[in-house]
Amino acid sequence: MSRLPMAERRDQLVHAALAVAIREGIDAATVRRVAAEAGVSLGVVHYCFEDKDELLREVGKVITSQNVERVAFDLPATPDLRAALGAALGGVWDAIRENRGAQLLSFELTTTALRNPELRGVATVQLEHDTEVSEQVLTQAAEVAGTRWTVPVRELARLCVAAINGVALAWLVDEDDAAARAALASFADHIAARSVPAEVGSRVSAG
Amino acid sequence: MSRLPMAERRDQLVHAALAVAIREGIDAATVRRVAAEAGVSLGVVHYCFEDKDELLREVGKVITSQNVERVAFDLPATPDLRAALGAALGGVWDAIRENRGAQLLSFELTTTALRNPELRGVATVQLEHDTEVSEQVLTQAAEVAGTRWTVPVRELARLCVAAINGVALAWLVDEDDAAARAALASFADHIAARSVPAEVGSRVSAG
DNA sequence: GTCTATAGTTGGATAGAC
DNA sequence: GTCTATCCAACTATAGAC
């Protein structure tokens, strides 16, 4: 249609690819279907992207950043650490629940990336990003609650990511929302138990 | 080649499909590649299976039953529940570690099944099977340790499955074995904490 | 920058000889 | 039961007109 600058055209195509992939799976996101979704011809996609893998790499970036944005840092400023974690995980869960296709696509992208060297980075970046965000949330929650973690925050962040992914995968299969929430709440307890009240004074004041 | 009865031929083809899929991913397991792997011609596969989906359904069954067999119930007969769970998870983890391709294929099968109504059952059965086995192991461990679970075993089994899947997915991406083991050990603590000594007397003997 | 047309592969499925 | 030959659909990618 209209003549757009390359950057905008790429953005449009990436979002078209994302829409198709969320709706019908990553295998359905062919160059042809993406072109059709965006309302452009096949040649345009090949003009804007080196090849299909480059397009998928961009889709991976968008999915990853959306995962991060969804957490939205609406962490309640409560001194009750368990409540704060529960609320944070609840927020994450609501986002997953309302974006089933995106969550499934996220897993599809990971497995695809693990088989395709050209896409390997997509899986790595996604995991790293998720872990990083979890770490920030955990750190922030501890600060607000006046506690400190008894094991490295990084390890706890990994636990959170694994728990969320594991619960999400099961939920995609059995659609048991109540069980998913219960599982996340249980994991939240586990994480919260790895904290103790922070020493509010200086390090040498204990006695 | 030789003229095999249908059942054996099917078995041979399913295992050929499994080999290809483990090695190169589910998308590589085309009817043609499977036929080549088994050393038969294209027509034979179509003669033995209704269509590709039926072949993949059989692959799903085999993968699922292998997951179960791998646990092997080598649960140590120790009264230390935490140690028993740690050993069980350790065993599961060794199996996953030594079968990276199979673990990845397991996830690929799940996502594929979630997009394809013809394969939907593969995902359901796999999750159900895993949960069932976890439940049996947890029950058995509690018996040996002389404890009882304070929450429904079914819920704990779901936690185990989610934890294992989440940890396995992360490991497939970052290959950090030590972190994976640490995460599983942490989750084992969490599960073990959901137990209390069983009342050895009758139900009415409590004071 | 966008389009049509087409080359070149690959895949699922079937027909029919043996 | 097994094979070869073939059909047809869909895909990635490119060439070249506009």
Image (cartoon, coloured by chain):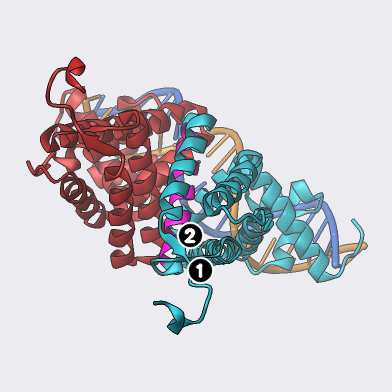
Chain colours: A cyan, B red, C blue, D orange
User: Residue A11 at x, y = what percent?
Assistant: 76, 62
* Residues shaded magenta: A155-173
Amino acid type indicated by mark 2 = Ala
The rendered magenta stretch, by its main secondary structure, is classed as: helix
Q: Gap between marks 2 and 1, in whole Å?
A: 7 Å
- In the foreground, B123 or B75: B75
At horizontal 63% and vertical 48% (from top left) the residue drawn is A29
Output the chain of dot 2. Answer: A
Label 2: which secondary element:
helix
Could you tell me which quadrant the C terminus of chain B lies in? top left
What residue would you read off at disc 2? A113
Residue B114: % across, % down: 50, 35
Q: Residues within 10 Å of mark 1 (few under 14, many from 20)?
A: some
Residue at the farthest top position? B204
* The quadrant where residue A2 appears: bottom right
Mark 2 and 1 residues: CB-CB less than 8 Å, in contact? yes
